[in-house]
Amino acid sequence: MSKDKDKRVKKKYNVETGFFEDGLPYARIGDKPNIIVNIEALSFKHEPPSGFTLKQFIKSARPFIEEYTVYLIVRKQNVPEDYTFTDMASDYAKMIRREFKEPVVIMGASTGGQIAQYLAANHPDIVRKLIIISAAYRVSEKGAEIEGKAAKYFKKGKYGNSLAAILDLIFSSKITRSIAKFFTRLIGKRIIGKIKYPNDFLTEVRGDIEMNFKERLKDIKALTLVLSGDLDIEYTADLVRETAEGIPNSKLILYEGYGHNLAAKWKLLQKDILEFLKK
């Protein structure tokens, strides 16, 4: 999507994008005092949401704006190579305390759901409720293998191949996956665009692969909703069940016949999330 199209979309839906003062990129929709902070999933570059990502954010957030202001927040740009999920969670915590001054609803899908666990365990005072989507206390061996493959392509500047590798996690259907990967290899580099800070993506992948939060799940005190597809190969149903069982005040919903692209199925999730938020 061009910058002009982004402007039209933002004007139509009254969406704001930019950077917080500490460098966290964001998109915001809504004007209510209650806040939902959605931590973005694995991202190739840390910039304010635009194009397809911006449209998906608007689509997913609109059901909640009657009662909430919804943010999609990315990670800082140009982070050091040794930056960890603990550091990233601290960045979010510092921003939330400064900007909102009270607990907020934390939502995170995939990598965002992993970082959300650190945020909830390490900074319980700012987490009103926690929603984990398509994530668990660690990735599966298959998930680690695929993300590692994507990182290898990325290091070589083969961004189309890197994005195509990630699609192995997203699409459960072999036919859909094959078609999507074919076109992604052809135009993936154009879709991703110029990468100013390539280490940001590699740092997130390393965090995904190295994370094992099982022993810390008990430190998450917020009321928690865990949502996942039973066909997810990156965060298998068994891993998701263990995650929900390890969090003291949690509820698990497994959707049959869905894989890792669950976050794109907002009509499926909307009712369950809204019921959880009303409790």
Image (spheres, grey):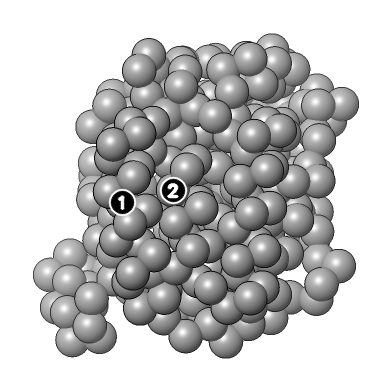
Q: Nearer the viewer, residue 236 or 189?
A: 189
Which kind of residue does numbered mark 1 sit on?
Answer: Ala
Which kind of residue does numbered mark 2 sit on?
Answer: Leu
Q: Nearer the viewer, residue 133 or 148?
A: 148
Question: Which residue is drawn at the image coordinates 81% and 46% (left, top)?
Answer: 210
**Quadrant of the rendering where the N terminus is positioned:** bottom left
| Residue for badge 1 | 180
Relative image position of residue 246 (x, y in whole percent): 74, 17
Which numbered tag is attached to residue 167? Answer: 2
Secondary structure at badge 1 equals: helix
Looking at the image, is mark 2 or mark 1 earlier in the sequence? 2
Mark 2 and mark 1 in contact? Answer it, CB < 8 Å.
yes
Relative image position of residue 145 (x, y in whole percent): 68, 43
Q: Is residue 34 left or right of residue 104?
A: left
Query: How crowded is the residue under tag 1: few (<14 C-alpha within 10 Å), some, or many (20+)?
Result: some
Question: Which residue is drawn at the image coordinates 59% and 58% (left, top)?
Answer: 150
Please tell me in which quadrant of the rendered image residue 206 appears. bottom right
In the displayed structure, would residue 77 be above or below residue 95? below
Relative image position of residue 225 (x, y in whole percent): 52, 24
Q: Is residue 30 left or right of residue 232?
A: left
Residue 27 visible at all: no
